[in-house]
Image (cartoon, helix red, strand yellow):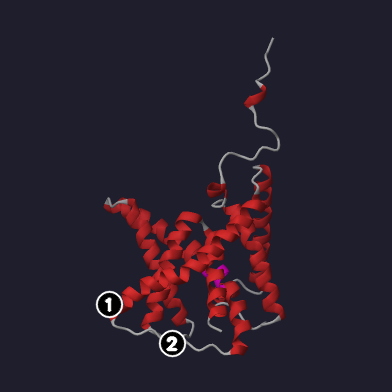
Amino acid sequence: MAKSPPADSAPAADEPPPGGYLDWSRDPAVGLFAVLPLWLLYESLRALLTPAERNGAELLLLRELDRLGAHGLLALRLCFAALTGWAAVSLVRRQVPWSRVAAVLALEGAVYGLMLGPTAAAMTSSAVRILSIGAAGPDLLDHELMADLVGSLGAGIFEELVFRLGLMSLLVWIGLRVTRAWSLPIWVAGAAAVVVSALVFSWFHHLCGEPYERTRFVFRTMAGMLLGLLMWARGYGVCVYTHTVYNVYFYLANE
């Protein structure tokens, strides 16, 4: 007669999957749902308060979508909806406590966002002393504050999407093939991807029309390197909240 398996051989129906916050927060599906409220907030505030405000990285994506014709933006939204649906099914099927993880993820990103400025500033200070360049910050007009705060949301979402999740991942993919061909250590590919994506991230701001100033370029490069390392260790969701909270804190502190 066949024996039934022991009662403790299978997890209970409401038992969470093995792992912990550090594993779950790096899950792409969790990261997607964690960023979704921020994305919706950005779109709502932009439509209500600053309809003409769009982040440079977002404009870059929209310009490429225009190449697909009149239905390019619709195709992007449908793909995003399908991706969100897939993420929801995946989270429910694996019993991941995504709401609690997303809340802590947002808090973690907020803490990193408050730390990003001082850390990048300290790194910039050393680099600027070597280059003998004095720092000069722009004066912000009061009527520009709201547009800056809305833009902060878009910057966190789209710049991390383009430069960290997109460009850095592509550079890692290319770098791994180069390191294998030349028998180099694998970490070289990761380090090169972090540095190159940070340089492109910094230079992109000047390509969008901001006058070139070496101190700002170095600062953004240092910040981009820190965000690249954070992306490598903690994932897209944490990076978005880190970048967004830093930008909001910067504009509020320098009003």
- Secondary structure at badge 2 equals loop
Question: Where does label 1 land, which residue?
Answer: 130
Residue 240 vertical position relative to residue 134 in the rendered view, above or below = above
Magenta stretch holds residue 127: no
Which of labels 2 and 1 is toward the front?
1
Residue 131 seen by the camera:
yes
Q: Could you tell me if the residues under marks 2 and 1 are in contact, i.e. CB atoms within 8 Å?
A: no
Q: Quadrant of the C terminus?
A: bottom right
**Residue flagged by tag 2: what amino acid is it?**
Pro
**Residue 152 coordinates in the image, percent (x, y):** 57, 75
Estimate how packed mark 2 is, as few (under 14), some (14 to 19) or many (20 or more) residues with alpha carbons within 10 Å.
few
Q: Nearer the viewer, residue 221 or 1?
A: 221
Q: Residue at x 50, y 55 (%)?
A: 234
Left or right: 197 with respect to 126? Answer: right
Seen in the picture, residue 96 relative to 253 is either above or below; the reply is above
Residue 170: x %, y % from top left: 44, 60
Q: Is residue 48 left or right of residue 136?
A: right
Q: Which residues are magenta?
A: 155-159
Name the image quarter holding the N terminus. top right
Give the mark nearest the N terminus, 2 or 1: 1
Identity of the residue drawn at 53% across and 49% down: 22
**139 to the left or right of 122:** right
Amino acid type at image mark 1: Ile
Which mark is drawn over residue 211?
2
Q: Can I make out residue 71 in this image?
A: no
**Is residue 157 magenta-colored?**
yes
What residue is drawn where x is 67% and y is 14%? 3
- Toward which corner of the image does residue 218 lie, by quadrant? bottom left
